[in-house]
Image (cartoon, coloured by chain):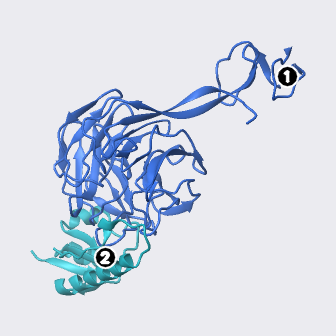
Amino acid sequence: MANKYWVIENTGKDFFTHQDRDDMPVFQGHPGDVWITSDNAKATAWSGKYPNVSKTKAEAQAIVDGKVEEAQEEWDNQDEPKHPEDRPVKYTLD
Amino acid sequence: MSGKIGNNTGYSSGSITAPSGGVEILSSDPTLTEGLLWYNSTSNVLKVARTVGAWSAVNDCNTGITYSCAFGTQTAGVKAGGGTSSTVTEEYDGTDWSSVNALNTGRGELGACGTLTAGVSYGGNTGSTVAETEEYNGTNWTDVAGDLSGVRRQIGLGCGTQTAALITAGYSGSSYITTTEEYDGTNWASGGALGRNATFAAFGGILTAAFIVAGHTGSAVSASTSEYNGTAWTAVNDCNTAAEQTVGAGTQTDGLKYGGNSGATYYAVSETYNGTTWTTGGALSETRYRHSGAGTGSAAFTVTGNTATGNSDPSTEEYTEALTARTLTNS
């Protein structure tokens, strides 16, 4: 089954619970408040507890890419010392 | 009891009368209790009983490496992983390290907490940042289904138990992480956000009473300390030595932080935390960073990492606090 893609701000404690994780076999957080969940009724119910915007995978990927590019620029402009291995890298969402 | 202090250059001289209170004059050191003050008339020195922590070198582990994790106690400890691919796991019985069954996923920069017979490791760096979670039962590591909600490395170690673990901060490979996750023995849930960057920080305590101290903000090393109550993080007093790649142990009211670095400056210093203030304590026998360790605030260990001796040094040190008769000087 395909995944669902959301933009939802992480509100901290209990934003997602142990039960939520039980209910959604797929549950991943990414830069830009992008969340990937299982595509099931539990995921719809969870996302419905918060202001949310449903995204396509391509839209979610673009948000994450944009945040990584911001992080790369910030990293490049940092004064030394910084960890050379830590320059942010783009990746592909599941 | 009364007496006269002799050979006491550097101190006030004269008769001491101490019928009630005052400094007791004794020919030998008494049974020690914290804070007891006395004058030893045999050695002609003023002494006080203080709990003092000291590090001592003990037997090496079998596989020296950087970025491993450790958990457990000084007499039942575990070290696992390291680098970007190590699965090596070793157990420590307070005397020797023994190689035991390996992690399922080789990785370094991983977090871990718990006991030798009920541990959990999470996150790390395999070359890619991972959300992997594995549990250890004293014999085998088991890959569990409930991974972190996001990939996370450079996370210090985290703290807590196998059924109530805590991790915050770290780095995803694409961004700094300021969120918190809590593990219940099955899967991870969100906790209160730390709200600041802190990679390679030191942790101590339990899920409902934890601390995180020091670490790297992305642009500088930090001395910041925050405490967690199971719901929210609160900023408290800084430690004395800003550092990253340091290690913590103990509790929120009896904590310990040791080693680390700031750029090319490497530290042997340890600091103790009483829940309010960090105090510089006994130093490691040599500088150490990218190490691991675990234990309590009065009985901890550190193992491997980079030291003044060399990179991936397999050496181990133990920290032990003991009530000690200390001679007072006027310097």
Q: Chain of mark 2?
A: A
Find out whether the residues at labels 1 and 2 contact each other: C-beta distance under 8 Å: no
What residue did someone put label 2 on? A31
Q: Which chain is cyan?
A: A
Picture layout, residue B49 above or below residue A60 = above
Side (left or right) of A67 relative to B269: left
Tint of chain B: blue
Residue A47 at x, y = what percent? 28, 78
SS assignment at label 2: loop
Assign the N terminus of chain B to one quadrant of the image.
top right
Disc 2 residue type (three-letter): Pro
Quarter holding residue B241: bottom right
* Residue sitting nearer the eye, B174 or B261: B261
Residue B272 at x, y = what percent? 54, 44
Residue B78 at x, y = what percent? 30, 39
Disc 1 residue type (three-letter): Ser
